[in-house]
Image (spheres, helix red, strand yellow):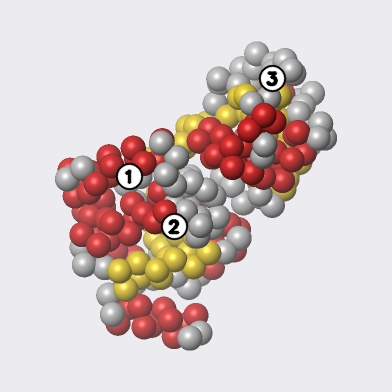
Amino acid sequence: MGLVSAVTFCAERKNLLIATGDFPPWTSEASKGQGFVNHVITAAFARQGYTVYYHFLPWARSYSDTERGEFSALSYWACSEKTQKTFYCSDPMHTESYVFFHKKTKAFPNWQKLSDLKALQIGATRGYTYTKEFWKAHKNNTLNIIVNNNDETSFKMLLKGRIDTVIVSSITGFLILNTKFNPIIAQTITFNSKPLVDNTAHLLFPKDRKNSQHLLKEFNQGLLKIKEDGTYEKYFDDLITGKY
């Protein structure tokens, strides 16, 4: 079934086709519930009588395709000033702390502003939000930022000594280290306690689709219900105990 016909089919059957990317444990085809965030979205919409299907894409493409209205929503993104120009943002689903991972043997600067990190080679992932200032520093070459297609590649570069630090969600970082690398090697890595940013995670609905505001209201109502009945708390307990 083609994408256009699939979207039409979903609209007729009160099913939803949502774009997403791979960012375990938050979103992942290989994870329980297709990741914590997607599990929450599925449960919230189920309370409102919807069935959700996910289409996994590279992050930048998932954003642009949903922005054009090819999908009912995008899971998931920060609700930035740029995002709000073309999307409606849901109520926040959770908060992520983006921190700088580094080798325990390497002293990390006691930084207060991004310019304090100018001596470091920083691994980042293409398509992630981080902060406007972070990407501006990359564009202006005021920070030495190496952009990779995924976090695992950045960690491999860190372990080989090709970069000094990796910026990633703290939970995601430890999941990658503990599942993709030898445990002994993973124990050589830590992170700096000062986060770059604490981002709230949102489901985005494209303003170009006529039913987006209705779906936004439906989702927010469903999200409130699963928080009130304990479902969300159970999922979060599973998240922090590594079940995603």
Residue at disc 1, secondary structure: helix
Q: Residues within 10 Å of mark 1 (few under 14, many from 20)?
A: some
Residue at left offset 65%, top offset 13%: 110
| Amino acid at circle 3 | Lys
Question: Eyeballing the image, is 215 above or below 15?
Answer: above
Query: Closer to the N terminus: mark 1 or mark 2?
Result: 2
Residue at left offset 64%, top offset 17%: 111
Q: Circle 3 is placed at which residue position?
A: 104
Q: Quadrant of residue 72?
A: bottom left
Q: Circle 1 is placed at which residue position?
A: 235
Residue at disc 2, secondary structure: helix
Residue at left offset 42%, top offset 54%: 32
Q: Provide residue 133's location: percent of width, then percent of height.
A: 62, 35
| Amino acid at circle 1 | Tyr
Q: Circle 2 is placed at which residue position?
A: 34
Q: Is residue 8 left or right of residue 166?
A: left
Query: Closer to the N terminus: mark 1 or mark 3?
Result: 3
Question: Eyeballing the image, is 9 above or below 155?
Answer: below
Q: Provide residue 213's location: percent of width, then percent of height.
A: 30, 62
State yes or no: discs 3 and 2 in contact (Cβ < 8 Å). Answer: no
- Separation of disc 1 and disc 3 at Cα? 32 Å
| Amino acid at circle 2 | Gln
Q: Provide residue 81's location: percent of width, then percent of height.
A: 48, 45
Q: Provide residue 214's location: percent of width, then percent of height.
A: 26, 64
Is 1 in front, or is 117? 1
